[in-house]
Amino acid sequence: MEEPMRRLLIPLVALALFFGLFAQTGRAQRRREPKWDRYDTKHYKILHSCSKIEASYLGDWMEFVHKAYSVIIKVKSDTKHVIKLFRDRREWNECGQPPGAGAYYTLHTKQLVGYYDRRAVFPYFAHEGTHQFIHIAVPDMPRLIPTWFNEGLADCMGSSKVINKKFRWCLFNALIAKGRSYTIKKALREGTARKLTDLFALTHRQFMGDAKLHYAQSWSMVHFLFCYPHVELPKKWIPNGKYKKAIVVYFDLLRKGTPHAEAWNEALGTIGKTHEEIEKEWKEYVLNTLPDTGPSDDDAYMGVRTQESKRGGMEVVSVVPGGPAEQAGFQVGDRIVYFEKKKIRNYDIFIAELKKRKPGDEIKVTVVRGRKTERLKLVLGRRGDYDKKEEEKKKKKG
Ligand SMILES: [Zn+2]
């Protein structure tokens, strides 16, 4: 199903977060900055080159998120958190920002940096904002807070939405969570997931060595601790699972400098569980309780990476070599505007239309290329076939 999800999610999130925590000064110096306008909220100072209304959308959102952060982490700070918000992806690239990232957090400046995108800006800033928030609460964060916990918590925060005017977080059916859920379920079924105690002990470098799996496993563990035995609570905005207390105790001990293994043991003690019991419950929860929401092998597959265009439609950012879209003649920069007679106004419509189709279906897609309009005949592939090919390619590269 969700072609752009995997394509967008994995590179953007994984890379963003990598840059996120450990971007160095040297790299930042080569970057240019646009002329900033300033927009203030209660807790954030937003320097932006996008429109004021866009900055205010993010500002409102971050105030919601800030409230959620404050539930678990107590911070005493009078200074506002700084956000730098570029106008769009184009400006982001022109200014020499990391091309694969959607947002990141820098330790040395304590700034949250990203670009405006109607769909991705909210989850990504909620994720990266978690690092910023933790860092302000725990100045020695890189040494004291294990990567699995930092990233797992950030992904739970990033998996949030405003539903009926209420901010809801730790959702399973959200942009970040859907991709993570697919990855960890697959890993558990295939027996490639890590033992939890091994995951907890990974250094940042080790964590990034198999980022896709480790992000997914960490997200699932923090989600489990927040929500178990439910998937999410329909009425409350704060998840209130049986083991939530373990998170609070664990974090509190970590910030005081307790070694992580000791902190975890003590946290388990407060909920009266052993490692083995928790590991077993977590596995069952992921496999049997979390619904399947992410992509599956039998989804129709197009083989493009896309983003919403401000002129309407979906702009092709990259084309997978040998994939269905390449065979149909798609090019980078094409703007997809119609699937048959259905107008593709935005991402949601694009995904909904793609989901209606099966592998092997043939559809006529209208794209705007420069000043011309082209109609391309696309035969959709099957996701599982292409995933396998990609994995084999990776193995060959070694
Ligand atoms: Zn992160």
Image (spheres, grey):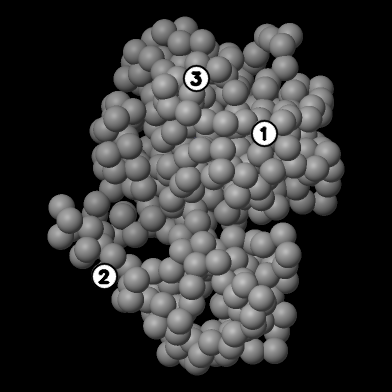
Image coordinates for residue 347, horizontal then vertical, percent: 65, 65
Compared to residue 338, the image places residue 140 above or below, namely above
Lower sequence index among marks 3 and 2:
3
**Mark 3 in CB contact with mark 2 (< 8 angstroms):** no
Question: Residue at position x 38%, y 52% from top?
Answer: 184
Amino acid type for the residue under numbered disc 3: Leu
**Mark 1 in CB contact with mark 3 (< 8 angstroms):** no
What secondary structure is found at the residue carrying circle 3? loop
Image coordinates for residue 211, horizontal then vertical, percent: 35, 42
Q: CA distance from mark 3 to mark 2?
A: 38 Å
**Label 2: how many Cα within 10 Å (few below 14, some 14–19, many 20+):** few
Does mark 3's beta carbon lie closer than 8 Å to ligand 1?
A: no
Camera-near label (1 vs 2) is: 1
Q: Which mark is residue 107?
A: 3
Q: Which residue is mark 2?
A: 389
Q: Which residue is mark 1?
A: 34
Lower sequence index among marks 1 and 3:
1
